[in-house]
Image (cartoon, rainbow, N blue to C red):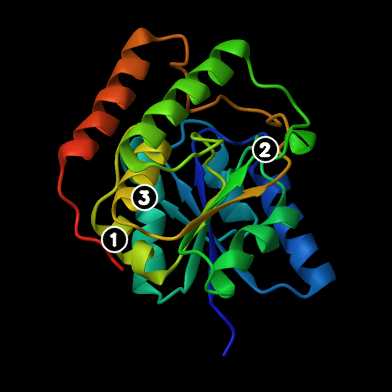
Amino acid sequence: MSAKILLIIPAYNEQECILKTYDSIITYCAEYNMDYDVIVINDCSKDSTSAILDINNIPHIDLIHNLGIGGAVQTGYKYAKENNYDIAVQFDGDGQHDIRYVQDIIKPILENEAEFVIGSRFVDNKNDNFRSSKARRIGIHIISFFIKLVTGEKIFDTTSGFRAVNKDIIEQFSKSYPIEYPEPITTTELLKKKYKFSEVPVKMHERIGGTSSIKAWKSIYYMINVILTILIIKIRRYPSVH
């Protein structure tokens, strides 16, 4: 039996790019005979995102309140659990993520080599085809340092939202998921629980349109908030899954 795979696409004010993103997935799946399901979580967009989803019959859930990136993604995980998916892949609706790399991200899970996988811009610098800002790169290095301090594991792309998890983690995330900046927090928690992980090289693109959900890279508050949360995870006791 083949694995059921779901792409979770959170969307907030993505009228400029959501249809192109969805069409790229459908075109790729048809050309290469890939069986990926899609659910777009429309996080109470104020633009025409909802209308575009309706008119083009794109599978989606309309949230009646704006929950932020964490709440939108968790809604996708709840949907994945309720519909018995084996693997869930977070996939941006803004054109940054490349559908061709989904097969690389899910491969370690399909082959039982990992339980969660991060698509990384930095694990192989040759794949970093657009440069992040200097402030963001510094922030990523700092967060990476603290994740290694807490877990002993080196993560190169701590803020990548291009990631896949197995069925067990789908169930966990459907019950509990951070509201703000969830990627470094969930990564740290999963590593503390001794889940097997892999970080695979991917290419990402400049966003087609809209506004990034990460607006606080120059904010001292953001860095302090993330680092303190990671340090709190260090002193928590987590049952090992292995």
Looking at the image, residue 5 lies above or below residue 191? below
* Amino acid type indicated by mark 1: Gln
At which x and y percent is residue 207? 68, 31
In the image, 140: left or right of 84?
right
Residue 111 can be seen, yes or no? yes
Label 2's element?
loop
Write down the residue under mark 1: 172
Label 1's element?
helix
* Other residues around mark 2 within 10 Å, as few (<14) / some (14–19) / many (≥20): some
* Other residues around mark 3 within 10 Å, as few (<14) / some (14–19) / many (≥20): many
**Badge nearest the viewer, 2 or 3:** 3
Real-space CA distance between mark 1 and mark 2, rounded to the nearest whole angstrom: 27 Å
At which x and y percent is residue 69? 41, 38
In the image, 7: left or right of 84?
right
The earlier-in-sequence mark between 2 and 3 is 2
Real-space CA distance between mark 2 and mark 3, rounded to the nearest whole angstrom: 26 Å
The residue lying at 31 percent from left, 66 percent from top is 171
In the image, 26: left or right of 105?
right
The residue lying at 73 percent from left, 46 percent from top is 20
The residue lying at 39 percent from left, 41 percent from top is 152
Kindly identify which numbered label has been placed on residue 96: 2
* Amino acid type indicated by mark 3: Leu
* Other residues around mark 1 within 10 Å, as few (<14) / some (14–19) / many (≥20): some
Residue 66 can be seen, yes or no? no
At which x and y percent is residue 215? 47, 18
Residue 241 lies in what quarter of the image?
Answer: bottom left
